[in-house]
Amino acid sequence: MNAWQRHMLGIIGLALLAAGVGLGLSETGSSLFVMGVLIKTGSMLLVLWLALPNVQQLYRRFPRWVWVVSALALFVTVLQRSMLLFVLVLFLVLLFFQLVSWFLSGLREER
């Protein structure tokens, strides 16, 4: 993501947050849902704007399968709350194997 795209993300986040706060300051009571959506979306975009360099570095550090498994685990957990413990244990086991492979590849490079 370019620098201008990152800054545009921050500007859009600020605009959504300001629109939500402005809507909250108005006297209409029927727009509480829209106000909540605007404030939450604006806040998330601002957090992403601040954390984007770290997120990009983290994305490059892990292989693609970790991200696919993470997305599937999140999807399954959202659909079936009772699967949370199973998905969490499975994800931690896969992450453990990834860490072991990093450690073993580091030993291989030292020889």
Image: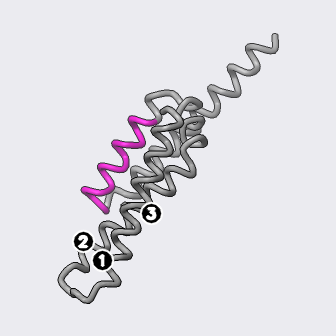
Residue 7 rendering spot, x and y as whole percentages? 50, 45
User: Is residue 51 one of those drawn in magenta?
Assistant: no
Residue 78 rendering spot, x and y as whole percentages? 30, 57
Q: Is residue 46 above or below residue 105?
A: below
Residue 82 rendering spot, x and y as whole percentages? 31, 62
- Amino acid type indicated by mark 3: Ser
- Which of 89 and 73 lies nearest the eye of the viewer? 73
| Residue at (38% x, 66% y) in the render | 40
Q: Kindly identify which numbered label has been placed on residue 23.
A: 1
- Which of 61 and 106 lies nearest the eye of the viewer? 61
Question: Spatial distance from mark 2 to mark 1, Cα to Cα?
Answer: 8 Å
Element type where label 3 sits in the image: helix
Mark 2 surroundings within 10 Å by alpha-carbon count, few (fewer than 14), some (14 through 19), many (20 or more): some
Give the residue number, with chain letter if any, for mark 3: 43
- Amino acid type indicated by mark 1: Leu
Q: Are marks 3 and 1 in contact (CB under 8 Å)?
A: no
Q: Main SS type for the magenta part?
A: helix
Mark 1 surroundings within 10 Å by alpha-carbon count, few (fewer than 14), some (14 through 19), many (20 or more): some
Q: Kindly identify which numbered label has been placed on residue 34.
A: 2
Residue span colored magenta: 67-81
Element type where label 2 sits in the image: helix
| Residue at (68% x, 19% y) in the render | 105
User: Is residue 75 one of those drawn in magenta?
Assistant: yes
Q: Earlier in the sequence, mark 3 or mark 1?
A: 1
Give the image quarter of residue 16: bottom left
Q: Earlier in the sequence, mark 2 or mark 3?
A: 2
Q: Is residue 90 above or below residue 21?
A: above
Residue 72 rendering spot, x and y as whole percentages? 34, 42
Q: Are marks 2 and 1 in contact (CB under 8 Å)?
A: yes
- Amino acid type indicated by mark 2: Val
